[in-house]
Amino acid sequence: MSTLFTETEERRDLRKAVAELGAKYGPEYFRTAAKEGRKSTELWDEAGRLGYLGVAVPEEFGGGGGDIGDLAAVCEELAAAGAPLLMIVVSPAIVGSIIAMFGTDVQKKRWLPGIADGSATYAFSITEPDAGSNSHRITTTARRDGEDWLLSGGKTFISGVDEASHVLVVARTEDARTGKLKPALFMVPTDADGFTKAPIEMGITSPEKQWTLFFDGVRLPQDALVGDEDAGLMQLFAGLNPERIMAASFATGTARLALSKAVAYAKDREVFEKPIGTHQAIAHPLAEIHIEIEMARLMTQKAAALLASGDFMAAGEAANMAKYAAGEVVCKAVDQAIQTHGGNGLAVEYGLVDMLAGSRLSRIAPVSREMVLNFVAQFSLGLPKSY
């Protein structure tokens, strides 16, 4: 039977093992770390030692040799346990995928082993204040200066820069033949001269922080360029599809956690001498959410399988759909879990109110629901482009 519908025994075993690790830490660990301003370093390091962060890294570079579906399973199970790792979406999934597919042998040997064992963390930056979802308006540029590159510009809403040794930056270079700007990717040390960052105050409970970045003539060696200077757009999309798959897994894991809390409460909370879960007004919304979670998980699984098979166009369509479905259901799940708990849903001890902003983010990042609908309307339905 196709693994689109039935996961392999190896992946099911992986899910079980990761779920056990997540349960060892759990929501209280995550929430305490976030509120005390600490990172979830202990969980990250243990996940790295156990090989979970590197499941999709090729074996010759210290990884498990699996695919993005395996890494997505790790991401989902940690989120479902209440101990999510946002940087797993960024470092192993986006940066790791791009370097594994397009990096030189030297770059792979330099960057991938650290991703595989968790000893190195890398951030990814594409979003700019004035570009939004329009990647064609990116103004961060890299120009040649002898054998080096000089990087100038800025990025915003970039995750985990304070945890990363390098940031994979999406910039634009000038085509020597046409003079037009084209996308290219550079690994930039976070301690480079001319590279500064400023935190963005967010209302989300998370150990990972968001940053605005500034590049003021940052000098980079020639080998900071990842892959081919003339294949930047293809390389960029190679990272964005894994990003959407991982974001969907992050969201479905969170939705599973919210649903599990709601179901447990509906079984135990008694009003009028019977559990509130006996009432269809409580039971039916939770049943609907369960169905929608499973649909989102299945679409995520399909996207991962298509990406692993090398069908990048179909994977892009499925990854966008998976991200949309997961973003919708996680918002619905958290909201309904709070409603099921009544006033207790807003009490900190029940662990739901902290999930509100994070779940809402799933409708916005890494691509907004509206841009996904634009994509589906244009590419899936063949409707005229609206923007």
Image (cartoon, helix red, strand yellow):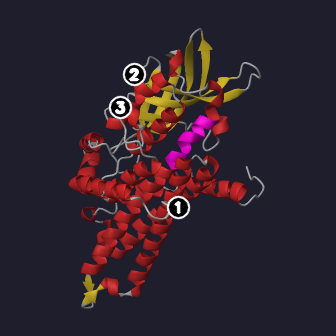
Label 2: how many Cα within 10 Å (few below 14, some 14–19, many 20+): few
Inspect the image, locate mark 2, and give the three-letter code of the amino acid beneath it: Asp
SS of the residue at dot 1?
helix
Numbered label attached to residue 114: 3
Residue lying at 40% horizontally and 63% vertically, measured from the top left: 255
Numbered label attached to residue 130: none
Residue 16, percent across and down? 30, 58
Residue 300, percent across and down? 50, 58
SS of the residue at dot 3?
helix
- Residue 366 in view in this figure: no
Residue 297 vs residue 29, the one in the foreground: 297
Inspect the image, locate mark 3, and give the three-letter code of the amino acid beneath it: Gly
Q: Please report whichever mark, 3 or 1, sits nearer to the chain's N-terminal start.
A: 3
Q: Is residue 241 magenta?
A: yes
Q: Is residue 62 above or below residue 274?
A: above
Residue lying at 45% horizontally and 52% vertically, measured from the top left: 69
Q: Tell me which segment is drawn in magenta.
A: 234-244
Position of 76 with respect to 270 (left or right) is right
Residue 123 vs residue 62, the one in the foreground: 62
Residue 45, percent across and down? 26, 39
Label 3: how many Cα within 10 Å (few below 14, some 14–19, many 20+): many
Numbered label attached to residue 299: 1
Residue lying at 37% horizontally and 38% vertically, measured from the top left: 63
Q: Nearer the viewer, mark 1 or mark 2?
A: 1
Q: Nearer the viewer, mark 2 or mark 3?
A: 3
- Residue 244 in view in this figure: yes
Q: Are marks 3 and 1 in contact (CB under 8 Å)?
A: no
User: Which residue is label 2 attached to?
Assistant: 191
Position of 384 with respect to 23 (left or right) is right
